[in-house]
Amino acid sequence: MSISSRFSVGIHVIALIELNKDGVSSSEFLAGSVNTNPTLIRKIMGMLKKAGLIDVQPGIAGAKLAKDPSDISLLDVFKAVDVVKEKDLFTIHESPHPDCLVGRNIQDAIIPILSAAQIAMEKVLGNVTIEDIIKDIVGKE
């Protein structure tokens, strides 16, 4: 299993909206860059709008960033696109057998480790902004 591609698509969409700020970033235009269908892009754009990361106007093609790219972290995008619920990156099987040595102790043994891993991942994502991603993309050209 992997984290939903909505996360990377959300980053792609926001970066492209910023880089195309003098043009019209319609769902069709964005979908062409992502190489997916505009319906999926509209769904992700709705999530980004709800999180206050982009502005879109009903009936008007295009989107704009609602914040400066330096004020949008990858963690903001991660949370906006509902990749996972709060503190729920890792799910633990709920009903291990209580008569088994491992079964009765596995949850208590791994939950603190998995929680620490999620906190560490979120810290990394919180320290990287869309501006950082855009600079990297532009630098690669």
Image: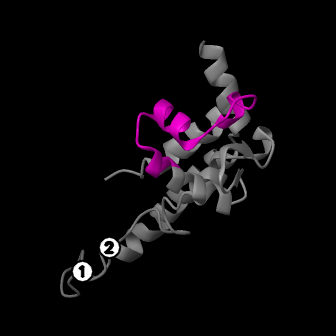
Above/below status of 48 relative to 133: below
Question: Is residue 19 one of those drawn in magenta?
Answer: yes
Q: Residues within 10 Å of mark 2 (few under 14, many from 20)?
A: some
| Residue nearer the viewer, 132 or 50 | 50
Residue at the far top in the pictured view: 141
In the rendered image, which quarter contains the C terminus? Answer: top right
Overall secondary structure of the magenta stretch? Answer: helix
Q: Amino acid at mark 2?
A: Ile
**Residue corresponding to mark 1:** 96
Query: Left or right: where does residue 85 sit relative to residue 37?
Result: right
Q: Are marks 1 and 2 in contact (CB under 8 Å)?
A: yes
For the rendered model, the colour scheme is one colour
Above/below status of 48 relative to 74: below
Residue 107 location, quadrant: bottom left
**Disc assigned to residue 106:** 2
* Residue shown at 41% from the left, 43% from the top: 37
| Residue nearer the viewer, 128 or 57 | 57
Above/below status of 39 relative to 136: below
Please tell me whether mark 1 sits on a helix, a strand or a loop. loop
* Residue shown at 64% from the left, 37% from the top: 25
Q: Position of residue 56 (x, y in %)?
A: 69, 52
| Residue nearer the viewer, 70 or 56 | 56
Q: Position of residue 105 (x, y in %)?
A: 32, 78
Please tell me whether mark 2 sits on a helix, a strand or a loop. helix
How far separated are the C-alphas under marks 1 and 2? Answer: 8 Å
Q: Position of residue 95 (x, y in %)?
A: 26, 83
* Residue shown at 69% from the left, 38% from the top: 130
Q: Amino acid at mark 1?
A: Pro
**Disc assigned to residue 114:** none
Q: Nearer the viewer, mark 1 or mark 2?
A: 1
Q: Position of residue 102 (x, y in %)?
A: 24, 74
Which stretch is magenta?
17-41
